[in-house]
Image: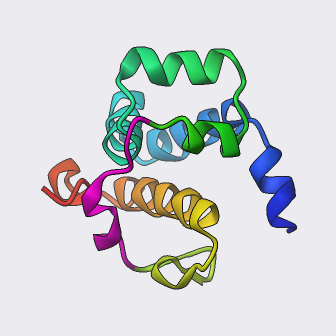
Amino acid sequence: MNNERVFKMPFSKVYPLLVQKAERKGRTKEDVDAVICWLTGYDDAGLRAQIDKQADHKTFYGEAPRINPNANKIKGVVCDVRVEDVKDPLMQKIRWLDKLVDELAKGKPLEAVLRI
C-alpha cells in the first residue's frame, strides 16, 4: 500500500479497529487509549478531539504533543515489518502503535506494553 494513502487515512477510521482487536482478546478501550496517549502525549480530551475532527494520520501524529522518548524501545514485527527498521518517521509511528496494540491483544501487561 502506498504510504501517502495511509497518511491521508483518517485516524478515526483506524481507531475502532484497534479497539476491536484489543477487545476481542479481553482488553478494553481504556487500555487502547492508554497506549495511544503514552505514545503520542495526547490526553483523553486531545485524543477525542483528534478523532472527532477526523484528523488523518499525518495530522494526528503531527499535532501530537510529544512522542514518548521510550518509543524507540518498541521492537518487533507487525504485519511482516520490523518496526525498528521502518525508515519513514510517520510510518514508523503508525507501526509503533500497531505493535503496541498487538502486544495488548497478546495479553502483555499494560506496564510491559508501555515500557514502564
Q: Which image quarter: residue 90?
A: bottom right
Residue at 59% of width from left, 23% of height from top? 50
Give the vertical position of 92 relative to 105 (above or below): below
Q: Nearer the viewer, residue 59 or 22?
A: 59
The C terminus, quarter of image:
bottom left
Image location (x, y in percent) of residue 1: 86, 68
List x then y, in percent, for residue 78. Answer: 54, 73
Q: Residue at x 39, y 30 (%)?
A: 42
Q: Position of residue 82 (x, y in %)?
A: 52, 83
- The reply to whether the magenta stretch includes residue 37 is no
Q: Nearer the viewer, residue 50 or 97?
A: 50
Q: Which residues are magenta?
A: 65-75
Which residue does the image show at 76% across and 51% down from the upper left?
Answer: 7
As drawn, is 48 to the left or to the right of 57? left
**79 vs 93, nearest the viewer:** 93
Q: Is residue 48 left or right of residue 36?
A: right
As drawn, is 51 to the left or to the right of 23? right
Q: Nearer the viewer, residue 98 or 109?
A: 98
| Colouring convention used in this rendered image of the protein | rainbow
Q: How many marks?
A: 0
Could you tell me which residue is drawn at 45 percent across and 20 percent down? 46
Q: Is residue 68 magenta?
A: yes
The x and y percentages for residue 59 are: 66, 37
